[in-house]
Amino acid sequence: MWKFFHQWASPPHFYRLAKVLIPWLAVPGLLLIAYGTYAGLFLASPDYQQGDAFRIIYVHVPSAYLSMMAYVFMAVGGGIGLIWRLKLAHAVGAAAAPLGAAFTFLALLTGSIWGRPMWGTWWEWGDPRLTSELILLFLYFGYMALRSSIDDTAKADKASAVLALVGVINVVIVHFSVVWWSSLHQGQTLFKKGGPGMDADMLYPLLAMILGFTFVFGALLARRLRTEVLYRERRTRWVRELVLTPGGGR
Amino acid sequence: MKPRQQRMLAVGLAAFGVAIAAALTLRAFDENMMFFIDISDVVAGEYPTERTFRIGGLVVDGSVHREEGSLDMTFRVTDMRCDLAVSYSGVLPDLFREGQGVVAHGRMAPDNVFVADKILAKHDENYMAPEVAESLAKHVEGKMTPLQEGGAECNQG
C-alpha cells in the first residue's frame, strides 16, 4: 500500500498520469457547465422575490464553494508535505493557490454585483460572511507572496505550508459565519434542515454548475501541477530525458 | 517516537492550538461579530446608546406608512416576539417589502423609535418560482397566527 502510494506520487509517474487525467476532467466539466448555463438562464423559473437577478448564484455558489475547497487542498497538501515529506504534496499547494484566489475573487465580485440591487449595498464592512471571505482572499495573496519571497523551494514549501495550516481555521469561519452570527448574507440553502430550500428546476442547474466547476478546477489544478512538477524537477534526469526526446516534452 | 510521528504530533498540536485561540478570540468578540442586534434585545434596552448600530428583523405586514410627497416613511420591524417602530427617509432596496427581512442602520430616538439612516434588505435561504410561492401562501394563510403587539413573551426593559 505504501509502496503503491509512493510510486503514484513520484513526480515522473504523476506527470504522465496527470496528462491522461486532464481531458477526463475537462470534458465532463465543460459539458456540465454548458448544461448548467443553459438550464440556469432559460429553463429555471425566476425567483418569487428576486426575479431574474437570482441567476447569478449559478456562478456565485460554485465559485464560493471552490474558494474554500482550493484552500482545503492547499492546507491538506501542506500538512501531508510537512509530515510525510512528499514533494508532490507541496506542489499541490503551490498549484492550487492562484486558482483559489481567482475563485474567491469571483465569489466576492458576483456577490457584490448581486448585493447592490438586492440588499441595497455593494459591500458592508462588519458583516461576518463578507469579511471572512475577504480575509480568505488575503490569505491566498499572503501564501503566494510568502512562496515567491523565499528562493529555496524546500524552505518556501515549509513556511507556506505552516501559513496554509494556520489559515484553514478561516475556512471554517467562512462556512459557519451565517450560522454563528447574524449576517446580511442568507443562511444555507442546499444543506438546510428538511432538504434544499430551492425548487427542482432551479436546483439541478446549480448542482450541475457546482459539479462542472469542480471538474474544471481539477483539470486546471492537474495542468498547473504538471508545470509545477516539471519546474521543481528541472535538474533531474527524467526531465532532461523528457525534454531531449523529440516530442517528449508535450 | 519516529520522526514522522513527531511531525504529525507537531502539526496536530499546532492546528489544535490555532483552533482554540480562534475560538476564544471569536467568543470574546461575539457581540461585535453580530452584524445586527435582535429586536427583542433592543426592546429590552440592550443596545449601545452613544453610537449607531444595526437592527434586523421582518417588516410587519401592513405597518408601512409613507408620507405623501416625500421620502419619509415609518414601519415596524419584528423578530416574532417583540416589534419596534422604525422611521426612515430615503431610497429603498428592491427586496424591501412587508413580511420580508430587513436590516436597518441608525440610532434609537428618545421616544423609542429607531431612526434609520440606511435600510438594507435581507434575503432568506429559500428560492422558488412565483407560482409555488403563491400556492404556498394560500395553504399557509389560514394557519398563521397574527403577531401580537408586544406579545406576552416580549420583555420590555
Image: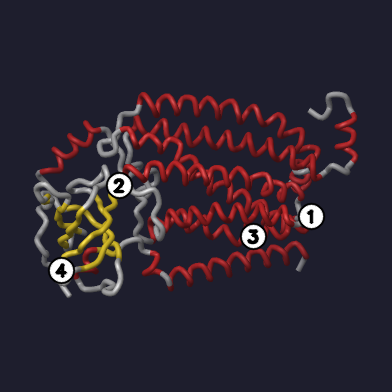
Residue at 21% x, 73% y is: B45
Figure label count:
4
Residue at 26% x, 39% y is: A49
B153 to the left or right of A110? left
Is A208 above or below relative to B101?
above
Are dots 1 and 3 on a single chain?
yes
Q: Estimate the x, y position of residue A85 in percent, counting from the top left.
A: 76, 55
Whether tag 1 and tag 4 are in contact, CB under 8 A, the answer is no
Q: CA distance from mark 1 to mark 4?
A: 63 Å
Within 10 Å of the Cα at label 2, are there few (<14), some (14-19), or many (20+) other Cα atoms? Answer: many
Chain of the residue under the numbered disc 1 shown in the image: A
Is A40 above or below relative to A7?
above
Query: On the image, which quarter does residue A25 sit in?
Result: top right
Q: Amino acid at mark 4?
A: Asn
Chain of the residue under the numbered disc 2 shown in the image: B
Are dots 1 and 4 on a single chain?
no
Front residue (pair B12, B21): B21
Q: Estimate the x, y position of residue B104 in percent, counting from the top left.
A: 26, 57
Can you identify the residue that label 4 sits on? B112
Can you identify the residue that label 2 sits on? B123
Q: CA distance from mark 4 to mark 2?
A: 27 Å
